[in-house]
Image: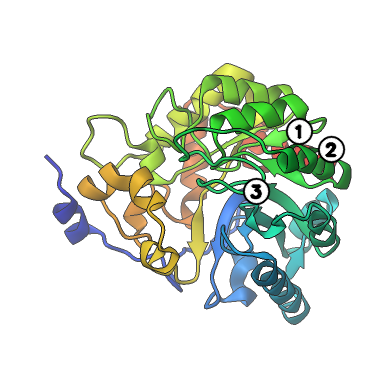
Amino acid sequence: MTTRQSLDDVAPHPLQKGHHTKGTTQYLFVDSCCQIWPDTAYEELHEYTPTAYCITTFRPHDGAENALDEIANWHRIERTYANVRIVRDAEDIVEAKRSGEVGIVLAAQGGDFIGQNIHRLEMFHAIGLRMMIPAYNARSTLCDGCLEPHDGGLSRLGKAWVAEANRLGVLIDLTHVGRRSTLEILDLTEKPVVFSHSNPLKLVDNPRNITDEQIKRAAETGGLVAVTNWGPLNFRAGSTKRPTVEDFIDAIDHVVGLVGIDHVGIGTDMSHGTYPDGDLVRGRSSKSTVGGPYAQHVEGSPRSRLRYVEGFDDYGQLPQVVEALSSRGYDEASVRKVLGENWVRVFKEVW
């Protein structure tokens, strides 16, 4: 039996400054979930495989003031570093690839910053917010997160938020959101809706994963499901070993089998810079709820490479991921869709 201790001894490799391997790729790659921490070497961000990162711009449960401060800081970063471009429309991503820059999609993992004032969304859109999760695991003023036991669905404010996000062109992201809430949002939306880093519940029974119904309904809006290489969402029942890139490709296969190649992407949930000790900093129990068995058998530290599947725990391994897709029968056009073209299509339609 493989134990956490033996894996730690082999490869503790922290996710911190200087960790990721640089490397170029011919593909336009949109990573639909990434953290970029303050000690990141911003001047080097364009040297890694993603063309654009959809970043967790501020902490999931931040109020409006902290959220505003973090967006203001990204405007400073864009002004300071010539290689960094805040993405305001889909063409910015295409141009970033053409010019050797890196695109930053300002995204919110959680709706706490809205409070009771729906008009804040228009202000945040005006300063660059383009993608938003309405609730991060817990209940917000908009809806329930995926760890709320009563799965209460949308509030009245939440229903108004769906219409306002559609009107403004803020892409609705349903990762971390409760199942009833997702289905109610999918009923109401007039624009494509996505899951930015979620895997099929059919393969791994984890409260963060999503049902086949959710996957199909998202695709019916014209949206997509971005599969993640985050270890706990690929950790099969009864396993004590670190999942591999093949488990990750299994999740892609499952989504493609349900809804087709036009409705799948990749959201790594990886970090640039030093990830803080998440549970201690956030003071939340949700991490242990979602990752408990994984932490017991493989790794509990959010800074460890072992928190991602073996074979895709580094941006420099993207060429190997492409090889793995090719070995499963995905042709060149399909690979390009999975890596980024599907995202650009959705962005164009919503933004």
Q: Nearer the viewer, mark 2 or mark 3?
A: 3
Q: Is residue 141 above or below residue 238?
A: below
Report x, y in % for residue 189: 78, 31
Q: Residues within 10 Å of mark 1 (few under 14, many from 20)?
A: many
Horizontal side of residue 44 vs 309, given as left or right: right
Report x, y in % for residue 193: 71, 35
Numbered label attached to residue 349? 2
Report x, y in % for residue 247: 38, 33
Mark positioned earlier in the residue sequence (2 or 3): 3
Which amino acid is tagged 3?
Thr
Task: Tell me the residue at 62%/74% (across/down).
Answer: 42
Asked if the residue under mark 1 is in contact with the one under mark 2, i.e. CB atoms within 8 Å, the reply is yes
Which amino acid is tagged 1?
Pro
Which amino acid is tagged 2?
Glu
Q: Residues within 10 Å of mark 2 (few under 14, many from 20)?
A: some
The reply to whether residue 28 is visible in this rendering is no
The image quarter in which residue 241 lies? top left
Q: What is the spatial separation of the Cα atoms under label 2 and label 3, in whole angstroms?
A: 27 Å
Q: What is the spatial separation of the Cα atoms under label 2 and label 1, in whole angstroms?
A: 8 Å
Disc 1: which residue:
192
Q: Secondary structure at mark 1?
A: loop
Q: Nearer the viewer, mark 3 or mark 1?
A: 3
Disc 3: which residue:
141
Q: How many marks?
A: 3
Task: Tell me the residue at 49%/38% (across/down).
Answer: 323
Report x, y in % for residue 234: 38, 37
